[in-house]
Amino acid sequence: MSTRVTLLCHAATAATGRAAFPLDEPPTAHGRAAAERLAPIVGGKPPRAVRGPELRCADTAAAIGLAHALVEPALRDCDHGSWAGRTLEEVLAADPTGVAAWLGDPDAAPHGGESLTSVLARAGGWLEEQERAGRHGRVVAITHPILARAVAVHALRAPASVFRHLDAGPLARVDLTYNGTRWALRGFGLLGP
């Protein structure tokens, strides 16, 4: 038997619309409506449903009919430290050296938050836990674009540099299967028609 993991990114928020580093905020009305339209596609109640602890994950889970999803701390968003709530343009104007370090070095955390290396390790640890648990069947995880990308990098056993070549936004999804030996990437992109 195999394990199937579907990671679904939360719905759009005000920060998403401004292209800002995220805050803990709910989805916009438009984002929630888009998530509600996905409820039939997600396919009812999967055997296991988990979510990041943030409000945007909770509200997205509820909108697609997974209000019962358990909070999984490992699926929390990246801590962007002092950059939270600010646009990349604003941060670049104030700290161009910090932005260059953040974009070029996965160990850098000029914002005082979490480095990409840390996010990749946390995401990889969560995926490895799905292996160790020996559970079969399907799990749906409502999380963040950065976590969905990080899980995909880990599943592919790719270097950290691949992370910046993957793009995921609101309601994007990553589908993976585990056959007892290795993970396979079944899909990466938007969920739905």
Image (spheres, grey):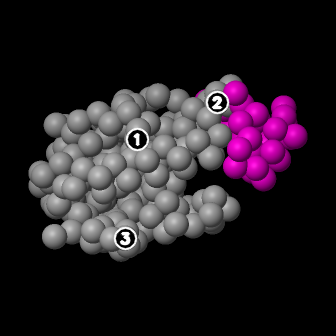
Other residues around mark 2 within 10 Å, as few (<14) / some (14–19) / many (≥20): some
Q: Which mark is residue 57?
A: none
Residue 80, placed above or below residue 16: above
Mark 3 highlights which residue?
A: 182
Picture residue at 62% right of the left edge, 63% below the top: 159
Mark 1 highlights which residue?
A: 75
| Residue closest to the eye, 107 or 181 | 181
Other residues around mark 3 within 10 Å, as few (<14) / some (14–19) / many (≥20): few
Q: Amino acid at mark 2?
A: Gly
Picture residue at 25% right of the left edge, 64% below the top: 4
Q: Amino acid at mark 3?
A: Arg
- Percent across and percent down for residue 134 are 22, 56
Residue 38, placed above or below residue 107: below
Q: Is residue 166 left or right of residue 123?
A: right
Task: Evaluate whether residue 72 shows in this view.
Answer: yes
Please tell me which of labels 1 and 2 falls first in the chain: 1
Question: Is residue 102 within the magenta segment?
Answer: yes
Residue 173, placed above or below residue 72: below
Question: Is residue 28 within the magenta segment?
Answer: no
Please tell me which of labels 1 and 3 falls first in the chain: 1
Q: Which quarter of the figure is the N terminus placed in?
A: bottom left
Q: Is residue 115 left or right of residue 178?
A: right
Q: CA distance from mark 1 to mark 3?
A: 21 Å
Q: Which quarter of the figure is the C terminus placed in?
A: bottom left
SS state under label 2:
loop
| Residue closest to the eye, 57 or 12 | 57
- Percent across and percent down for residue 188 are 43, 68
Q: Amino acid at mark 1?
A: Leu
The magenta region covers 85-112
Mark 2 highlights which residue?
A: 113
